[in-house]
Protein backbone atom coordinates (compact mmCIF):
# COMPACT_ATOMS: atom_id res chain seq x y z
CA UNK A 1 0.00 0.00 0.00
CA UNK A 2 1.29 3.41 -0.93
CA UNK A 3 0.75 5.98 1.74
CA UNK A 4 -0.20 9.48 0.73
CA UNK A 5 2.81 11.74 0.59
CA UNK A 6 2.63 14.29 3.36
CA UNK A 7 2.27 17.67 1.70
CA UNK A 8 1.57 19.55 4.87
CA UNK A 9 3.27 18.69 8.12
CA UNK A 10 0.98 18.02 11.11
CA UNK A 11 2.16 21.19 12.76
CA UNK A 12 1.32 23.30 9.76
CA UNK A 13 -2.06 21.59 9.50
CA UNK A 14 -2.63 22.47 13.13
CA UNK A 15 -1.91 26.13 12.45
CA UNK A 16 -4.05 26.26 9.31
CA UNK A 17 -6.98 24.58 11.04
CA UNK A 18 -6.78 26.95 13.98
CA UNK A 19 -7.19 29.85 11.57
CA UNK A 20 -10.10 28.13 9.78
CA UNK A 21 -11.89 27.31 13.05
CA UNK A 22 -11.46 30.82 14.43
CA UNK A 23 -12.67 32.18 11.08
CA UNK A 24 -15.89 30.15 11.21
CA UNK A 25 -16.54 31.15 14.80
CA UNK A 26 -16.07 34.82 14.00
CA UNK A 27 -18.19 34.47 10.85
CA UNK A 28 -21.21 33.37 12.92
CA UNK A 29 -20.85 36.46 15.10
CA UNK A 30 -20.45 38.73 12.06
CA UNK A 31 -23.58 37.30 10.41
CA UNK A 32 -25.64 37.91 13.55
CA UNK A 33 -24.34 41.45 13.92
CA UNK A 34 -25.08 42.24 10.26
CA UNK A 35 -28.66 40.93 10.38
CA UNK A 36 -29.64 42.40 13.75
CA UNK A 37 -27.67 45.58 13.14
CA UNK A 38 -29.27 46.14 9.75
CA UNK A 39 -32.81 45.66 11.05
CA UNK A 40 -32.30 47.83 14.13
CA UNK A 41 -30.34 50.53 12.24
CA UNK A 42 -33.21 50.94 9.79
CA UNK A 43 -36.04 50.14 12.17
CA UNK A 44 -35.26 52.08 15.33
CA UNK A 45 -35.55 55.51 13.62
CA UNK A 46 -39.18 54.60 12.81
CA UNK A 47 -40.01 54.28 16.49
CA UNK A 48 -42.23 56.94 17.98
CA UNK A 49 -45.17 56.98 20.36
CA UNK A 50 -47.42 57.17 17.33
CA UNK A 51 -45.81 54.17 15.68
CA UNK A 52 -46.00 51.92 18.74
CA UNK A 53 -49.36 53.07 20.14
CA UNK A 54 -51.12 54.27 17.01
CA UNK A 55 -53.53 52.52 14.68
CA UNK A 56 -52.42 51.73 11.12
CA UNK A 57 -53.65 54.08 8.43
CA UNK A 58 -54.99 52.47 5.26
CA UNK A 59 -53.53 48.97 5.04
CA UNK A 60 -50.44 49.99 7.00
CA UNK A 61 -48.91 52.59 4.67
CA UNK A 62 -48.49 54.84 7.64
CA UNK A 63 -49.64 55.05 11.22
CA UNK A 64 -48.80 52.59 13.94
CA UNK A 65 -48.81 48.94 14.89
CA UNK A 66 -50.63 48.91 18.22
CA UNK A 67 -53.35 46.44 17.06
CA UNK A 68 -50.60 44.07 15.90
CA UNK A 69 -48.83 44.24 19.25
CA UNK A 70 -52.13 43.53 21.01
CA UNK A 71 -52.87 40.67 18.57
CA UNK A 72 -49.46 39.12 19.17
CA UNK A 73 -50.06 39.32 22.90
CA UNK A 74 -53.51 37.68 22.64
CA UNK A 75 -52.53 34.73 20.41
CA UNK A 76 -49.39 34.09 22.47
CA UNK A 77 -51.42 34.21 25.68
CA UNK A 78 -53.94 31.67 24.38
CA UNK A 79 -51.15 29.45 23.10
CA UNK A 80 -49.41 29.44 26.49
CA UNK A 81 -52.57 28.93 28.55
CA UNK A 82 -53.20 25.74 26.60
CA UNK A 83 -49.65 24.52 25.98
CA UNK A 84 -48.15 25.13 29.44
CA UNK A 85 -50.31 22.72 31.47
CA UNK A 86 -50.25 20.08 28.74
CA UNK A 87 -46.49 20.34 28.26
CA UNK A 88 -45.53 20.54 31.94
CA UNK A 89 -47.89 17.78 33.12
CA UNK A 90 -46.72 15.52 30.29
CA UNK A 91 -43.13 16.25 31.24
CA UNK A 92 -43.79 15.31 34.87
CA UNK A 93 -45.31 12.02 33.78
CA UNK A 94 -42.46 11.22 31.40
CA UNK A 95 -39.78 12.13 33.93
CA UNK A 96 -41.30 10.65 37.08
CA UNK A 97 -43.87 7.99 36.25
CA UNK A 98 -43.01 6.56 32.85
CA UNK A 99 -40.93 3.42 32.57
CA UNK A 100 -39.75 1.97 29.31
CA UNK A 101 -43.00 0.79 27.79
CA UNK A 102 -44.22 0.92 24.21
CA UNK A 103 -46.60 3.69 25.23
CA UNK A 104 -43.72 5.84 26.45
CA UNK A 105 -41.84 5.27 23.21
CA UNK A 106 -44.96 6.22 21.26
CA UNK A 107 -45.40 9.41 23.31
CA UNK A 108 -41.77 10.40 22.78
CA UNK A 109 -41.98 9.74 19.07
CA UNK A 110 -45.22 11.74 18.87
CA UNK A 111 -43.66 14.71 20.71
CA UNK A 112 -40.63 14.53 18.45
CA UNK A 113 -42.81 14.43 15.34
CA UNK A 114 -44.83 17.35 16.66
CA UNK A 115 -41.59 19.31 17.07
CA UNK A 116 -40.50 18.71 13.50
CA UNK A 117 -43.73 19.06 11.54
CA UNK A 118 -43.39 22.10 9.23
CA UNK A 119 -45.26 25.11 10.52
CA UNK A 120 -47.30 25.43 7.33
CA UNK A 121 -48.71 21.94 8.00
CA UNK A 122 -49.84 23.18 11.42
CA UNK A 123 -51.44 26.03 9.50
CA UNK A 124 -53.27 23.57 7.24
CA UNK A 125 -54.46 21.62 10.26
CA UNK A 126 -55.57 24.79 12.05
CA UNK A 127 -57.51 25.83 8.97
CA UNK A 128 -59.35 22.56 8.49
CA UNK A 129 -59.78 21.68 12.20
CA UNK A 130 -60.21 24.89 14.21
CA UNK A 131 -61.44 27.31 11.55
CA UNK A 132 -63.70 25.00 9.54
CA UNK A 133 -64.48 21.82 11.52
CA UNK A 134 -64.90 23.41 14.96
CA UNK A 135 -66.35 26.55 13.32
CA UNK A 136 -64.12 28.96 15.20
CA UNK A 137 -63.61 31.00 12.04
CA UNK A 138 -60.54 33.08 11.30
CA UNK A 139 -59.98 34.26 14.84
CA UNK A 140 -57.59 34.91 17.70
CA UNK A 141 -58.80 31.60 19.16
CA UNK A 142 -58.04 29.52 16.04
CA UNK A 143 -54.62 31.12 15.68
CA UNK A 144 -53.80 30.81 19.39
CA UNK A 145 -54.77 27.13 19.52
CA UNK A 146 -52.72 26.35 16.40
CA UNK A 147 -49.72 28.03 18.02
CA UNK A 148 -50.37 26.07 21.24
CA UNK A 149 -49.86 22.80 19.37
CA UNK A 150 -46.48 24.07 18.18
CA UNK A 151 -45.40 25.24 21.63
CA UNK A 152 -46.24 21.96 23.42
CA UNK A 153 -43.14 19.96 22.34
CA UNK A 154 -40.81 22.86 23.19
CA UNK A 155 -42.23 23.22 26.70
CA UNK A 156 -42.41 19.47 27.20
CA UNK A 157 -38.80 18.78 26.28
CA UNK A 158 -37.27 21.62 28.31
CA UNK A 159 -39.43 20.85 31.34
CA UNK A 160 -38.63 17.14 31.18
CA UNK A 161 -34.90 17.75 31.08
CA UNK A 162 -35.05 20.10 34.05
CA UNK A 163 -37.21 17.73 36.10
CA UNK A 164 -34.82 14.88 35.39
CA UNK A 165 -31.91 17.07 36.49
CA UNK A 166 -33.30 17.40 40.03
CA UNK A 167 -30.88 15.41 42.23
CA UNK A 168 -32.13 12.00 43.32
CA UNK A 169 -31.20 12.84 46.92
CA UNK A 170 -33.89 15.55 47.08
CA UNK A 171 -36.54 12.97 46.26
CA UNK A 172 -35.13 10.36 48.58
CA UNK A 173 -35.07 12.88 51.42
CA UNK A 174 -38.71 13.73 50.91
CA UNK A 175 -39.81 10.12 50.50
CA UNK A 176 -37.88 9.10 53.61
CA UNK A 177 -39.84 11.70 55.58
CA UNK A 178 -42.98 9.80 54.64
CA UNK A 179 -44.23 12.04 51.83
CA UNK A 180 -46.14 10.34 49.05
CA UNK A 181 -44.87 10.35 45.46
CA UNK A 182 -47.12 13.20 44.37
CA UNK A 183 -46.35 15.24 47.51
CA UNK A 184 -42.67 14.81 46.73
CA UNK A 185 -43.13 15.91 43.14
CA UNK A 186 -45.37 18.81 44.07
CA UNK A 187 -43.38 20.13 47.05
CA UNK A 188 -39.81 19.17 46.18
CA UNK A 189 -39.21 18.27 42.55
CA UNK A 190 -41.25 20.98 40.85
CA UNK A 191 -39.96 23.88 42.98
CA UNK A 192 -36.40 22.72 42.29
CA UNK A 193 -37.11 22.48 38.55
CA UNK A 194 -39.00 25.77 38.28
CA UNK A 195 -36.24 27.78 36.55
CA UNK A 196 -35.94 25.09 33.87
CA UNK A 197 -39.70 24.86 33.45
CA UNK A 198 -39.88 28.66 33.16
CA UNK A 199 -37.18 28.56 30.49
CA UNK A 200 -39.29 26.03 28.57
CA UNK A 201 -42.37 28.26 28.81
CA UNK A 202 -40.38 31.28 27.59
CA UNK A 203 -39.01 29.27 24.66
CA UNK A 204 -42.55 28.15 23.83
CA UNK A 205 -43.60 31.80 24.02
CA UNK A 206 -40.82 32.76 21.60
CA UNK A 207 -42.00 30.11 19.19
CA UNK A 208 -45.57 31.46 19.35
CA UNK A 209 -44.49 35.08 18.94
CA UNK A 210 -42.30 34.53 15.90
CA UNK A 211 -44.47 32.05 14.03
CA UNK A 212 -46.02 33.21 10.76
CA UNK A 213 -46.86 30.27 8.49
CA UNK A 214 -49.09 28.58 11.07
CA UNK A 215 -51.25 31.67 11.54
CA UNK A 216 -51.35 32.72 7.90
CA UNK A 217 -54.66 30.95 7.34
CA UNK A 218 -56.03 30.66 10.86
CA UNK A 219 -56.01 34.12 12.43
CA UNK A 220 -57.34 36.25 9.58
CA UNK A 221 -55.54 39.50 8.85
CA UNK A 222 -57.80 42.21 10.30
CA UNK A 223 -56.20 45.57 10.98
CA UNK A 224 -58.43 46.47 13.93
CA UNK A 225 -57.77 45.54 17.56
CA UNK A 226 -59.56 42.22 18.24
CA UNK A 227 -62.35 42.79 20.77
CA UNK A 228 -62.86 39.13 21.65
CA UNK A 229 -61.20 35.79 20.99
CA UNK A 230 -63.67 35.26 18.12
CA UNK A 231 -62.40 38.28 16.19
CA UNK A 232 -59.76 38.06 13.46
CA UNK A 233 -56.40 39.65 14.19
CA UNK A 234 -53.01 40.37 12.66
CA UNK A 235 -49.99 39.51 14.83
CA UNK A 236 -46.67 41.28 14.20
CA UNK A 237 -44.91 38.68 11.99
CA UNK A 238 -47.94 38.40 9.73
CA UNK A 239 -48.09 42.20 9.48
CA UNK A 240 -44.41 42.31 8.54
CA UNK A 241 -44.92 39.63 5.90
CA UNK A 242 -47.82 41.51 4.33
CA UNK A 243 -46.05 44.88 4.47
CA UNK A 244 -42.89 43.47 2.90
CA UNK A 245 -44.29 41.20 0.18
CA UNK A 246 -47.14 43.44 -0.93
CA UNK A 247 -44.84 46.45 -0.94
CA UNK A 248 -47.14 48.44 1.33
CA UNK A 249 -44.57 50.45 3.24
CA UNK A 250 -40.86 49.83 3.65
CA UNK A 251 -40.34 52.18 6.64
CA UNK A 252 -43.20 50.56 8.55
CA UNK A 253 -41.86 47.12 7.64
CA UNK A 254 -38.47 48.11 9.10
CA UNK A 255 -40.16 49.40 12.25
CA UNK A 256 -42.23 46.23 12.68
CA UNK A 257 -39.16 44.06 12.09
CA UNK A 258 -37.23 46.02 14.72
CA UNK A 259 -40.02 45.50 17.28
CA UNK A 260 -39.95 41.75 16.60
CA UNK A 261 -36.15 41.59 16.82
CA UNK A 262 -36.17 43.49 20.13
CA UNK A 263 -38.78 41.12 21.58
CA UNK A 264 -36.71 38.08 20.56
CA UNK A 265 -33.51 39.64 21.94
CA UNK A 266 -35.17 40.31 25.30
CA UNK A 267 -36.44 36.73 25.40
CA UNK A 268 -33.04 35.24 24.55
CA UNK A 269 -31.25 37.35 27.14
CA UNK A 270 -33.74 36.53 29.88
CA UNK A 271 -33.63 32.78 29.19
CA UNK A 272 -29.84 32.91 29.29
CA UNK A 273 -29.99 34.71 32.61
CA UNK A 274 -32.38 32.10 33.99
CA UNK A 275 -30.29 29.17 32.78
CA UNK A 276 -27.12 30.64 34.24
CA UNK A 277 -28.77 31.30 37.58
CA UNK A 278 -30.18 27.79 37.59
CA UNK A 279 -26.90 26.05 36.79
CA UNK A 280 -25.13 28.09 39.47
CA UNK A 281 -27.74 27.09 42.01
CA UNK A 282 -27.44 23.41 41.10
CA UNK A 283 -23.66 23.47 41.12
CA UNK A 284 -23.61 25.28 44.47
CA UNK A 285 -25.19 22.42 46.36
CA UNK B 1 -57.31 5.79 51.75
CA UNK B 2 -58.00 9.27 50.39
CA UNK B 3 -54.27 9.69 49.83
CA UNK B 4 -54.19 6.65 47.55
CA UNK B 5 -57.09 7.95 45.53
CA UNK B 6 -55.34 11.25 45.10
CA UNK B 7 -52.16 9.55 43.96
CA UNK B 8 -54.13 7.44 41.50
CA UNK B 9 -56.02 10.42 40.12
CA UNK B 10 -52.90 12.55 39.74
CA UNK B 11 -51.12 9.84 37.80
CA UNK B 12 -54.04 9.43 35.43
CA UNK B 13 -54.28 13.18 34.80
CA UNK B 14 -50.55 13.34 34.07
CA UNK B 15 -50.82 10.32 31.78
CA UNK B 16 -53.64 12.02 29.93
CA UNK B 17 -51.51 15.11 29.35
CA UNK B 18 -48.69 12.91 28.07
CA UNK B 19 -51.00 11.06 25.71
CA UNK B 20 -52.28 14.36 24.29
CA UNK B 21 -49.18 14.52 22.08
CA UNK B 22 -50.21 11.26 20.42
CA UNK B 23 -53.81 12.45 20.04
CA UNK B 24 -52.69 15.75 18.49
CA UNK B 25 -50.34 14.09 16.05
CA UNK B 26 -53.03 11.62 14.99
CA UNK B 27 -55.54 14.45 14.56
CA UNK B 28 -53.09 16.43 12.42
CA UNK B 29 -52.18 13.50 10.20
CA UNK B 30 -55.83 12.38 10.02
CA UNK B 31 -57.27 15.74 9.07
CA UNK B 32 -54.55 16.62 6.56
CA UNK B 33 -54.90 13.22 4.87
CA UNK B 34 -58.68 13.42 4.90
CA UNK B 35 -58.58 16.81 3.13
CA UNK B 36 -55.76 15.86 0.78
CA UNK B 37 -56.92 12.41 -0.25
CA UNK B 38 -59.66 13.56 -2.68
CA UNK B 39 -57.02 15.34 -4.77
CA UNK B 40 -54.64 12.37 -4.60
CA UNK B 41 -57.45 10.08 -5.75
CA UNK B 42 -58.72 12.28 -8.52
CA UNK B 43 -55.30 13.11 -9.95
CA UNK B 44 -53.77 9.74 -9.10
CA UNK B 45 -51.01 9.53 -6.48
CA UNK B 46 -48.25 8.93 -9.03
CA UNK B 47 -49.45 11.70 -11.33
CA UNK B 48 -49.65 14.00 -8.35
CA UNK B 49 -46.16 13.27 -7.07
CA UNK B 50 -44.39 12.94 -10.43
CA UNK B 51 -46.54 15.35 -12.46
CA UNK B 52 -44.44 18.13 -13.98
CA UNK B 53 -47.22 20.62 -14.42
CA UNK B 54 -48.93 22.68 -11.71
CA UNK B 55 -51.69 24.80 -13.22
CA UNK B 56 -54.66 25.14 -10.87
CA UNK B 57 -56.67 27.10 -13.44
CA UNK B 58 -56.77 23.94 -15.63
CA UNK B 59 -57.14 21.63 -12.64
CA UNK B 60 -53.75 20.06 -13.37
CA UNK B 61 -51.83 19.23 -10.24
CA UNK B 62 -48.30 17.82 -10.27
CA UNK B 63 -45.94 18.68 -7.44
CA UNK B 64 -42.70 17.28 -8.86
CA UNK B 65 -41.21 20.73 -9.58
CA UNK B 66 -41.86 21.69 -5.96
CA UNK B 67 -40.31 18.46 -4.68
CA UNK B 68 -37.23 19.26 -6.77
CA UNK B 69 -37.35 22.85 -5.47
CA UNK B 70 -37.57 21.79 -1.81
CA UNK B 71 -34.90 19.11 -2.09
CA UNK B 72 -32.65 21.31 -4.22
CA UNK B 73 -32.73 24.23 -1.82
CA UNK B 74 -32.20 21.88 1.08
CA UNK B 75 -29.23 20.17 -0.56
CA UNK B 76 -27.62 23.45 -1.49
CA UNK B 77 -28.16 24.89 1.98
CA UNK B 78 -26.61 21.78 3.55
CA UNK B 79 -23.64 22.03 1.21
CA UNK B 80 -22.83 25.39 2.81
CA UNK B 81 -24.14 24.74 6.31
CA UNK B 82 -22.63 21.33 7.06
CA UNK B 83 -18.94 22.29 6.81
CA UNK B 84 -19.58 25.63 8.53
CA UNK B 85 -21.51 24.00 11.37
CA UNK B 86 -19.00 21.20 11.88
CA UNK B 87 -16.06 23.60 11.98
CA UNK B 88 -18.08 25.89 14.25
CA UNK B 89 -18.90 22.98 16.55
CA UNK B 90 -15.27 21.82 16.68
CA UNK B 91 -14.24 25.39 17.43
CA UNK B 92 -16.73 25.66 20.29
CA UNK B 93 -16.06 22.24 21.74
CA UNK B 94 -12.28 22.04 21.36
CA UNK B 95 -10.52 25.26 20.44
CA UNK B 96 -12.38 28.35 21.62
CA UNK B 97 -11.16 30.00 24.82
CA UNK B 98 -13.71 30.63 27.54
CA UNK B 99 -14.45 34.26 26.67
CA UNK B 100 -15.03 33.38 23.02
CA UNK B 101 -17.41 30.60 24.05
CA UNK B 102 -19.32 33.01 26.24
CA UNK B 103 -19.90 35.24 23.21
CA UNK B 104 -20.43 32.55 20.59
CA UNK B 105 -22.96 30.42 22.49
CA UNK B 106 -25.57 33.20 22.87
CA UNK B 107 -24.82 34.25 19.29
CA UNK B 108 -25.81 30.83 17.98
CA UNK B 109 -28.86 30.83 20.26
CA UNK B 110 -29.97 34.21 18.96
CA UNK B 111 -29.46 33.11 15.35
CA UNK B 112 -31.74 30.15 16.13
CA UNK B 113 -34.33 32.44 17.68
CA UNK B 114 -34.60 35.06 14.94
CA UNK B 115 -38.09 34.75 13.42
CA UNK B 116 -38.21 33.28 9.94
CA UNK B 117 -40.05 36.35 8.59
CA UNK B 118 -37.09 38.45 9.71
CA UNK B 119 -34.73 36.19 7.76
CA UNK B 120 -37.08 36.44 4.79
CA UNK B 121 -37.34 40.21 5.12
CA UNK B 122 -33.56 40.59 5.37
CA UNK B 123 -33.17 38.32 2.34
CA UNK B 124 -35.71 40.29 0.36
CA UNK B 125 -34.25 43.70 1.18
CA UNK B 126 -30.52 42.94 1.25
CA UNK B 127 -29.68 39.61 -0.35
CA UNK B 128 -32.00 39.67 -3.38
CA UNK B 129 -30.69 43.03 -4.67
CA UNK B 130 -27.13 41.85 -3.96
CA UNK B 131 -27.67 38.69 -6.01
CA UNK B 132 -29.33 40.69 -8.78
CA UNK B 133 -26.32 42.96 -9.09
CA UNK B 134 -23.64 40.28 -8.84
CA UNK B 135 -25.23 37.27 -10.54
CA UNK B 136 -27.80 38.87 -12.83
CA UNK B 137 -31.42 37.79 -13.26
CA UNK B 138 -34.11 38.89 -10.86
CA UNK B 139 -32.13 38.01 -7.75
CA UNK B 140 -34.94 35.70 -6.62
CA UNK B 141 -33.45 32.25 -6.96
CA UNK B 142 -32.81 28.85 -5.48
CA UNK B 143 -29.31 30.01 -4.52
CA UNK B 144 -30.63 33.08 -2.69
CA UNK B 145 -33.06 30.91 -0.73
CA UNK B 146 -30.32 28.40 0.12
CA UNK B 147 -28.05 31.13 1.48
CA UNK B 148 -30.80 32.27 3.85
CA UNK B 149 -31.56 28.64 4.75
CA UNK B 150 -27.86 28.09 5.47
CA UNK B 151 -27.95 30.69 8.24
CA UNK B 152 -31.23 29.24 9.53
CA UNK B 153 -30.09 25.60 9.79
CA UNK B 154 -26.58 26.44 11.01
CA UNK B 155 -27.57 26.77 14.70
CA UNK B 156 -29.43 23.44 14.63
CA UNK B 157 -26.55 21.42 13.16
CA UNK B 158 -23.90 23.32 15.10
CA UNK B 159 -25.37 22.91 18.58
CA UNK B 160 -26.21 19.22 18.14
CA UNK B 161 -22.72 18.54 16.72
CA UNK B 162 -21.16 20.40 19.62
CA UNK B 163 -23.05 18.25 22.12
CA UNK B 164 -21.91 15.16 20.25
CA UNK B 165 -18.27 16.28 20.27
CA UNK B 166 -18.42 17.13 23.97
CA UNK B 167 -19.88 13.76 24.91
CA UNK B 168 -16.76 11.91 23.69
CA UNK B 169 -14.95 10.45 26.72
CA UNK B 170 -11.87 12.41 27.69
CA UNK B 171 -9.78 9.20 27.69
CA UNK B 172 -10.05 8.98 23.88
CA UNK B 173 -8.52 12.41 23.53
CA UNK B 174 -5.85 11.88 26.16
CA UNK B 175 -4.77 8.58 24.63
CA UNK B 176 -4.34 10.18 21.22
CA UNK B 177 -2.44 13.18 22.57
CA UNK B 178 -0.24 10.90 24.65
CA UNK B 179 0.75 9.07 21.45
CA UNK B 180 2.15 12.33 20.15
CA UNK B 181 -0.70 13.36 17.86
CA UNK B 182 -1.30 17.09 17.45
CA UNK B 183 -4.56 18.55 18.68
CA UNK B 184 -5.92 18.76 15.12
CA UNK B 185 -4.89 15.17 14.35
CA UNK B 186 -6.70 14.10 17.51
CA UNK B 187 -9.82 16.02 16.50
CA UNK B 188 -9.74 14.69 12.94
CA UNK B 189 -8.87 11.06 13.64
CA UNK B 190 -10.35 10.40 17.07
CA UNK B 191 -12.93 12.89 18.32
CA UNK B 192 -14.72 13.60 15.05
CA UNK B 193 -15.21 9.93 14.01
CA UNK B 194 -16.49 9.07 17.48
CA UNK B 195 -18.98 11.94 17.38
CA UNK B 196 -20.13 11.22 13.83
CA UNK B 197 -23.49 9.56 14.63
CA UNK B 198 -24.50 12.59 16.71
CA UNK B 199 -23.36 14.95 13.98
CA UNK B 200 -25.37 13.03 11.39
CA UNK B 201 -28.44 13.35 13.62
CA UNK B 202 -27.87 17.10 13.68
CA UNK B 203 -27.57 17.21 9.90
CA UNK B 204 -30.83 15.30 9.46
CA UNK B 205 -32.63 17.65 11.84
CA UNK B 206 -31.19 20.52 9.81
CA UNK B 207 -32.61 18.88 6.68
CA UNK B 208 -36.02 18.79 8.34
CA UNK B 209 -35.78 22.45 9.23
CA UNK B 210 -34.76 23.39 5.66
CA UNK B 211 -37.58 21.38 4.07
CA UNK B 212 -40.14 22.73 6.53
CA UNK B 213 -39.19 26.38 6.28
CA UNK B 214 -41.91 28.47 4.67
CA UNK B 215 -41.74 32.21 5.18
CA UNK B 216 -38.06 32.87 4.52
CA UNK B 217 -38.11 30.73 1.38
CA UNK B 218 -41.31 32.25 0.03
CA UNK B 219 -39.85 35.75 0.27
CA UNK B 220 -36.64 35.11 -1.68
CA UNK B 221 -37.03 32.03 -3.91
CA UNK B 222 -39.14 33.56 -6.69
CA UNK B 223 -41.76 30.78 -6.46
CA UNK B 224 -42.23 29.78 -10.13
CA UNK B 225 -43.66 26.24 -10.16
CA UNK B 226 -41.17 24.98 -12.75
CA UNK B 227 -38.03 22.89 -12.28
CA UNK B 228 -35.24 25.49 -12.33
CA UNK B 229 -32.61 25.14 -15.07
CA UNK B 230 -29.85 26.40 -12.80
CA UNK B 231 -29.42 27.41 -9.19
CA UNK B 232 -29.70 31.04 -10.27
CA UNK B 233 -33.26 30.57 -11.46
CA UNK B 234 -36.34 30.91 -9.28
CA UNK B 235 -37.90 27.81 -7.75
CA UNK B 236 -40.85 26.97 -5.56
CA UNK B 237 -40.76 24.86 -2.41
CA UNK B 238 -43.59 22.54 -1.27
CA UNK B 239 -44.19 24.74 1.77
CA UNK B 240 -44.40 27.89 -0.33
CA UNK B 241 -46.84 26.19 -2.69
CA UNK B 242 -49.31 25.80 0.17
CA UNK B 243 -48.76 29.24 1.68
CA UNK B 244 -48.99 31.07 -1.65
CA UNK B 245 -52.22 29.59 -2.91
CA UNK B 246 -54.27 28.66 0.14
CA UNK B 247 -55.70 32.17 0.28
CA UNK B 248 -57.85 31.72 -2.81
CA UNK B 249 -57.96 27.94 -3.38
CA UNK B 250 -61.37 26.31 -3.84
CA UNK B 251 -62.58 22.79 -4.57
CA UNK B 252 -59.98 20.40 -5.95
CA UNK B 253 -57.29 23.09 -5.74
CA UNK B 254 -57.90 23.34 -1.96
CA UNK B 255 -57.57 19.56 -1.65
CA UNK B 256 -54.44 19.55 -3.82
CA UNK B 257 -52.77 21.95 -1.38
CA UNK B 258 -53.56 19.59 1.50
CA UNK B 259 -52.15 16.77 -0.64
CA UNK B 260 -48.96 18.86 -0.92
CA UNK B 261 -49.03 18.87 2.88
CA UNK B 262 -49.19 15.04 2.84
CA UNK B 263 -46.03 14.92 0.70
CA UNK B 264 -44.28 17.23 3.17
CA UNK B 265 -45.41 15.13 6.13
CA UNK B 266 -44.11 11.97 4.50
CA UNK B 267 -40.68 13.53 3.94
CA UNK B 268 -40.46 14.68 7.56
CA UNK B 269 -41.54 11.30 8.93
CA UNK B 270 -38.90 9.51 6.83
CA UNK B 271 -36.23 11.84 8.24
CA UNK B 272 -37.48 11.23 11.79
CA UNK B 273 -37.39 7.46 11.38
CA UNK B 274 -33.79 7.70 10.14
CA UNK B 275 -32.70 9.82 13.14
CA UNK B 276 -34.36 7.42 15.53
CA UNK B 277 -32.61 4.51 13.86
CA UNK B 278 -29.22 6.25 14.17
CA UNK B 279 -29.85 7.08 17.82
CA UNK B 280 -30.84 3.49 18.48
CA UNK B 281 -27.69 2.14 16.80
CA UNK B 282 -25.49 4.62 18.61
CA UNK B 283 -26.80 3.55 21.98
CA UNK B 284 -26.00 -0.07 21.20
CA UNK B 285 -22.43 0.55 20.02
CA UNK B 286 -21.52 2.92 22.85
CA UNK B 287 -23.03 0.57 25.42
CA UNK B 288 -21.27 -2.50 24.07
CA UNK B 289 -17.97 -0.96 23.10
CA UNK B 290 -17.08 1.42 25.84
CA UNK B 291 -18.84 0.54 29.05
Image (cartoon, rainbow, N blue to C red):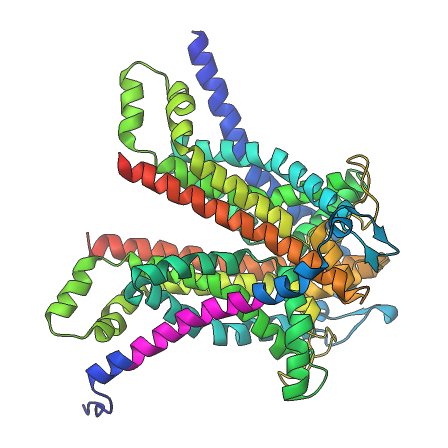
Main secondary-structure element of the magenta-colored stretch: helix
What quarter of the picture does the C terminus of chain A occupy? Answer: top left
In depth, the one of A102 and B68 nearer the eye is B68
Residue A52 placed where, x, y %?
73, 49
Q: Quadrant of residue B48?
A: bottom right
- Residue A218 belongs to magenta span: no
Tell me if residue A26 is in the magenta stretch. Answer: yes
Residue at x 60%, y 61% (from the top left corner): B212
A6 w.r.t. B234: above or below: below
Residue at 65% in and 41% down: A76
- In the image, the segment drawn in magenta is A16-35
Q: Residue at x 64, y 88 (%)?
A: B135
Give the image location of residue B13, x and y in percent.
Answer: 53, 25
* A79 relative to B74 in the view: left or right: right
Residue A273, horizontal then vertical, whole percent: 44, 45
Residue at the image point whose x is 47% and y is 15% from the top: B6
A8 to A283, vertically: above or below: below
Answer with left or right where residue A240 lies relative to residue B290.
right
From the viewer's perspective, is residue A251 above or below residue A196?
A: below
Question: Is residue B33 shown to the viewer in this render?
Answer: no
A13, above or below A150, in the image: below
Spot occupied by residue B187 in the image (x, y as percentages of width and height): 26, 70
Is residue A159 or residue A66 the one in the foreground? A66
Depth order, front residue of B136/A143: B136
Q: Is residue B12 visible?
A: yes
Amino acid sequence: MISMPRIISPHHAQKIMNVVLWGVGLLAIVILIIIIGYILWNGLPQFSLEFIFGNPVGSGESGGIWPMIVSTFYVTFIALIVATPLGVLAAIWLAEYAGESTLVKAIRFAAETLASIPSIVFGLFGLTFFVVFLQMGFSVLSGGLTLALMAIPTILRTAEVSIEAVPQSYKEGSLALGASKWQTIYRVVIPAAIPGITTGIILGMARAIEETAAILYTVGAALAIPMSIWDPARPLPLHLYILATEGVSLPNAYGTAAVLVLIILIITISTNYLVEKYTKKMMGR
Amino acid sequence: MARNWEEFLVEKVLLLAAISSIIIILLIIGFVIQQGLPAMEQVGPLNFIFGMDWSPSYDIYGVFPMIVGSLGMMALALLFAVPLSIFGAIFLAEVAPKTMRRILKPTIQTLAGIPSVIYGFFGLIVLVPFMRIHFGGSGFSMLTASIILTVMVLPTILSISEDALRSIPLEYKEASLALGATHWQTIKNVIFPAALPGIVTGIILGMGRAIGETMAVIMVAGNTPIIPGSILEPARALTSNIALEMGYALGLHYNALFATGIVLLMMIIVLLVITNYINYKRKVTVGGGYL
